[in-house]
Image: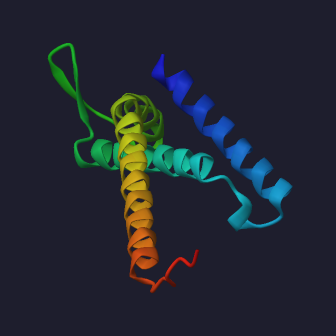
Amino acid sequence: MMILLFPLFLVASTIAVVADFVRAGSVRGVRGGLAFFLACLLLCYASAFVLISLDPYFDDNGAPSFIDLRFRWFWAAELAGWIALLFLPTAFALRAAVKGVRIRLRRTSENEAVAATPQEPIRE
C-alpha cells in the first residue's frame, strides 16, 4: 500500500511546488509549507534508501536474500512511506513550534523597544 501512496504524494507535492513557482515567478514565492513537505518527503526517501543499502538482505522464509541495487528503489519507496508516517507529523509540529517561538520572541523584543522609547508627558 505504501508503495503506491508514497510516489503519489511525492509527485503531487512536486507538481504543487512547480506550479507555485510558476505562479510566483521566483523561488521566494513558493509557499513554505509546500516546499517543506516536498523536502521532508525527499529526506524520507533518501534515508530509506540509505537504510536499505546499509543492510541489503531480507528474510525470505528463513533464508536471507540479497536485494540487488536495481530493486532497492522499490524497497526504499515502501520503507519511505512508513518513515513518512512518523516523520512528517513530527517535522510539521517542530516547524510550528519553532515558528511560534520566533513570533513570540519578535513580539517581546518589539514590546521592549516600545517600552524603552522616551515618552512625552501628557498635557491637559
Q: Nearer the viewer, residue 28 or 108?
A: 108
Quadrant of residue 59 in the image? top left
**61, above or below 112, in the image:** above
Q: Is residue 118 left or right of residue 61?
A: right
Q: Is residue 36 left or right of residue 71?
A: right
Residue placed furthest toward the left: 62
Q: Nearer the viewer, residue 53 or 7?
A: 7
Residue placed furthest toward the front: 124
Q: Is residue 36 left or right of residue 115?
A: right
- What residue is rendered at 47% in x and 42% in y? 70
Q: Is residue 112 left or right of residue 2?
A: left
Relative image position of residue 69 (x, y in whole percent) = 41, 45
- What residue is rendered at 43% in x and 78% in y? 113
Image color mode: rainbow
Relative image position of residue 89 (x, y in whole percent) = 39, 34
**80, above or below 24, in the image:** above
Locate the C terminus by quadrant. bottom right
- What residue is rendered at 55% in x and 24% in y? 5
Relative image position of residue 102 (x, y in whole percent) = 41, 61
Tell me how many marks there are: 0
Relative image position of residue 114 (x, y in whole percent) = 46, 75
Q: Nearer the viewer, residue 22 or 94?
A: 94
- What residue is rendered at 83% in x and 64% in y? 25
